Image (spheres, rainbow, N blue to C red):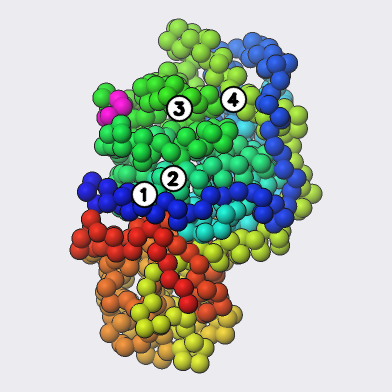
Amino acid sequence: MHSRRTVLSTAAAAAAACAAAGPAQAAEHVAGRPQPSPEGGPTAAARDRLRRLISRMTPEEKAGQLFVMRVYGHSATDPDPADASANRKEIGVANAAELIARYHVGGIIYFTWTHNTRDPHQIAELSNGIQRAGAAQRVPVPLLISTDQEHGAVARIGAPATLLPGAMALGASGARDDTWTAARISGAELYAMGIRQDYAPDADVNVNPANPVIGVRSFGADPQAVARRVAAAVRGYQDAGVAACAKHFPGHGDTDTDSHVGLPYIHHTAEEWERLDAPPFRAAIAAGIDSIMTAHIVVPAFDPSEDPATLSHPILTGILRERLGYDGVVVTDALGMQGVREKYGDDRVPVLALKAGVDQLLNPPDLAVAHAAVVRAMKDGELAEDDIDSKLLRILLLKERRGLFADPYTSRRAVDRVVGIRRHLDTADRIADRTTTLLRNDGGLLPLSRRRERRVLVAGVDAAAPTGTGGPPTEVLARELTGLGFTATALPTGPTPSQELIDRAVAALDGQDAAVVATYDVTARSPQRALVDALLATGKPVVQLAIRGPYDIAQLDGVRAGLASYCWTDVELRAAARVIAGRRDPEGRLPAPVMRADDPGTALYPIGHGLTY
């Protein structure tokens, strides 16, 4: 905890480094008509209509409306045979339409790996097919279609949709409107594809540099700066008609365990939580956020039973509902994650989550088991009917606010007018140009000169990028540098380069004038250190670019020039290449401190650090 507390004290001292975001100057860069919530929210008449709708539902239909489920396939009725087979195996149905007819689910979540997101036109037609299936039910209810389009490290929809800098990159930008603009663009494009809820923004404060699951998904390490960015993102998404979802309550930023594979513990005291974790969630609530996602983490200070927050009444009802005054929709993180399955069986988890204060149950591993358990608990009286009806009303009111009862459908024309248009792509590049951060530039090594360092070797990690992007990072960097007047050659060496690969990189540099090395989560024992040291030993200029967290440079003492792009997607890498080539001045400022490797209690580079040319 000592080093992370030092991170936080550094963060607090530099809170002013991140400017508040606002939409005033940015609207001209965003296509698509805003779809704001009706003034004052749904009317009394709308509430009465929705209550009558709920009263017509059977227990099975009510239970189904609480679930948001995955489904394989690019089509609601005619998926590929392999996807239909996967659906039968995992859900017991062949397609989305059958899923809705059998279980009456209230929402569908799109993933790349379930083959829902091939291209924007296909996504729009899938969305329309899902809504047609919802309208065909005995009690017609539109579905809330959602996805995780955080941008940066997590993006389910790739090009030709617009890909934008991720949260930590936006945290590095000093421009007032960038966060709102990015969320407004993303929201407009999601809306055009029939997606009315985005599981973003990430409201975690990343005070632990070793965090394996949040990292660059967070806006940074300063709670107040993160809070401002979160509020701006909420306004941007919801101005576009898409429900935002702040995650992961009560705060996943100070953990070294990934809740996908284990059960993390957060050992903050109540006072530390209030200072470190609460501000972004308070800001999201003040901004009128539609939904908040729970975390599968244990916080002993709030619940000594050591139940994960998703199943904790003291946390979800006592803190989120009562202390913070939130009355919007609460959705679980995915119920197939190990963090929520360690203590209880898959039949108990959904019931306990609903009793704790949850409204929506996201992606259980076995829907038949989960649905039957909720129905049984309703009929047995463990789940009170009035409480279930209140949850359903929250969900339906969200759908009402987002226009789903008025018109849940979209069209090819809407996609063509909004998704991946030149204005959005140009704006994404302009935002990215304000995020690349120059951490070190000893002797003025950067920018590279096309006369001195014309031939450039681009080596390093080729991290997996979202679907539809321009290729592996080394190839993107090499292609962009070549387009900027250099002759660049890509040589991917991976996150754990062997000695043979290191030797190949050194040999390849022999015919070049300089090297750019893309690094990714370098540790004290990482073979990436040996690669960088070997290239430095040649005496050629070596530029290091951290393509995930900005922390790598603390492990690379010999590097004279180091930058951070905060992610490995095209838009961020192209911006970094423009800085390396001197076409843009570096404007980014660290939103999280880089601590010394030999003294983790001391900042090597504090929040707000960033050099210019």
Q: Of the residues shown, which amino acid type is indicated by label 4?
A: Ile
Mark 3 or mark 4, which is nearer to you?
3
Residue 235 part of the magenta segment: no
Q: Which mark is residue 12?
A: 1
- Residue sitting at 53 percent across and 49 percent down? 20
Relative depth, front residue between 188 and 350: 188
Q: Could you tell whether 613 is left or right of 267 in the image? A: right
Q: Which residue is mark 3?
A: 324
Q: Of the residues shown, which amino acid type is indicated by label 2?
A: Gln
Quote the CA–CA distance across marks 1 and 3: 22 Å
Mark nearer the N terminus (2 vs 3): 2
Q: Could you tell whether 71 is left or right of 495 in the image? A: right
Q: From which residue to which does the magenta span run? A: 298-303
Q: Residues within 10 Å of mark 3 (few under 14, many from 20)?
A: some
Q: Which residue is mark 2?
A: 224
Mark nearer the N terminus (1 vs 3): 1
Q: Which residue is mark 4?
A: 395
Mark nearer the N terminus (3 vs 4): 3
- Residue sitting at 61 percent across and 60 percent down? 428
